Image (cartoon, grey):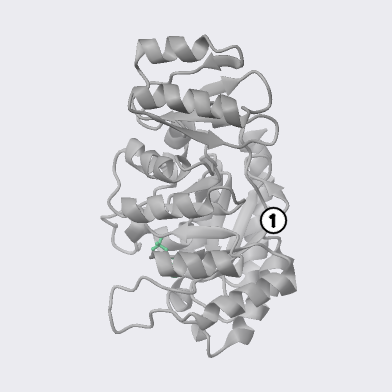
């Protein structure tokens, strides 16, 4: 990681450092910051001669070498001071809640508009809505491009930033062109490295964020953080980690609730952690307890499925979605708990 003396490198300086690292088989990935830009050396940066030549340049303040499998996401990285702002909230400084339907029903857009308004009223800062859905059964509703319109209309009506999962490059393009603020990578795709790279490339230079779910079979903490590194290595550091339960599940829960990994993530990365208790426990009645447990473990926020009329929803909503009333009570309790943990 190259830290310039000034706010950023000029194009001539950038060309010079690029040429030096290229001799050692590396490339430079600029990460543009509001106060100072930094320049990640992508590749094996252990070459002593390369470091000496870079440190000898008059416009280079220093070269930080972090021996970590995820040098950008690492808590010791210069990105550690990076703050992600979404929906008027700065993650890590105040409770952040993203809530909304699992699945937008294109035949009943009013449910989504009502849910969006209720979620805002309950105190959430961002709205989620599934446009395209990864379904275990190939004959289940797979989502609909039309739902993207509904999602963006709900964003216009409420002023809330919106999140939607994408599973391929076509959906990614549609979502970014429509102005989706947060791209969700689902549990099934958290290990799809080519999709992670496509997303990283596509959001570079934009202020789009990514909500990266933990995969169902992710064990080692490093595996999760490294998946985020795939995205961030293209220059946009707005990645939020989202534990959402893993396999195998105890009887009664949908997955094994994994909010307890929050401190382990916090020890190793600076990335904000927003826990999804809806998919971990998989039943509306268990969601509040799991959500509060996540905050107690130090999570920066919650991702919650919520629907104005869960029984009339589709996808996970009839089983998992909490009502806006429950959401409001839960947010109030989480806000009370927050200062006990973060204060
Ligand atoms: C969802 O958020 O509705 C979803 C499908 O999540 P996950 O990828 O965690 O299963
Ligand atoms: Mn869901």
| Residue 163 rendering spot, x and y as whole percentages | 56, 63
| Residue 246 rendering spot, x and y as whole percentages | 32, 53
Please give left or right for residue 220 compared with residue 225 in the image: left
Residue in front for this viewpoint, 12 or 332: 12
In this picture, is 142 found above or below 288? Answer: below
| Quarter of the image where one finds residue 328 | bottom right
Residue in front for this viewpoint, 332 or 192: 192
- Are there few (<14), some (14-19), or many (20+) residues within 10 Å of tag 1? some
The residue located at (65%, 57%) in the rendering is 331
The residue located at (61%, 83%) in the rendering is 111
Q: Using the rendered image of the protein, determine whether residue 45 is visible from the camera's viewpoint.
A: yes
| Residue 212 rendering spot, x and y as whole percentages | 45, 52
Q: Using the rendered image of the protein, determine whether residue 257 is visible from the camera's viewpoint.
A: no
Please give left or right for residue 271 compared with residue 340 in the image: left
Quadrant of the frame with the C terminus:
top right
| Quarter of the image where one finds residue 127 | bottom right
Mark 1 CB near ligand 1 (8 Å cut): no
The residue located at (35%, 38%) in the rendering is 221
Which residue position holds label 1? 87
In this picture, is 23 found above or below 214? Answer: above
Image quadrant of ligand 1 equals bottom left
């Amino acid at each position: 990681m190259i830290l310039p003396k000034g706010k950023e490198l000029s194009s001539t300086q950038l060309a010079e450092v690029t040429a030096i690292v290229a001799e050692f088989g590396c490339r430079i990935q600029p990460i543009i910051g509001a106060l100072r830009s930094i320049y990640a050396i992508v590749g094996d940066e252990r070459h002593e001669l390369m470091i000496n030549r870079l440190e000898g340049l008059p416009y280079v303040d220093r070269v930080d070498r972090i021996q970590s499998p995820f040098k950008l996401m690492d808590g010791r990285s210069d990105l550690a001071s990076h703050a992600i702002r979404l929906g008027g909230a700065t993650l890590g400084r105040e409770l952040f809640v993203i809530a909304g339907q699992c699945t937008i029903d294109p035949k009943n857009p009013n449910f989504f508009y009502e849910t969006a308004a209720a979620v805002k009223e309950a105190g959430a800062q961002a709205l989620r809505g599934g446009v395209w859905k990864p379904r275990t059964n190939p004959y289940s509703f797979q989502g609909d491009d039309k739902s993207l319109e509904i999602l963006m209309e709900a964003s216009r009506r409420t002023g809330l930033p919106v999140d939607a999962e994408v599973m391929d490059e076509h959906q990614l393009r549609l979502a970014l062109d429509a102005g989706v603020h947060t791209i969700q990578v689902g549990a099934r795709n958290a290990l799809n490295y080519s999709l992670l790279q496509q997303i990283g490339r596509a959001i570079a230079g934009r202020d789009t964020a990514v909500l990266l779910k933990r995969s169902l079979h992710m064990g080692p903490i490093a595996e999760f953080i490294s998946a985020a590194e795939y995205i961030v290595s293209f220059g946009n550091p707005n990645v939020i980690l989202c534990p959402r339960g893993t396999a195998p599940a105890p009887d009664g829960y949908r997955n094994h609730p994994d909010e307890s990994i929050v401190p382990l993530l916090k020890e190793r990365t600076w990335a904000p952690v927003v826990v999804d208790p809806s998919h971990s426990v998989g039943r509306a009645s268990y969601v509040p307890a799991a959500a509060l447990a996540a905050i107690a473990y130090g999570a920066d926020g919650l991702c919650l499925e919520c629907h104005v009329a869960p029984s009339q929803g589709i996808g996970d909503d009839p089983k998992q979605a909490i009502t806006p009333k429950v959401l409001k009570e839960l947010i109030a309790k989480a806000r009370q708990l927050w200062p006990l943990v973060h204060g």
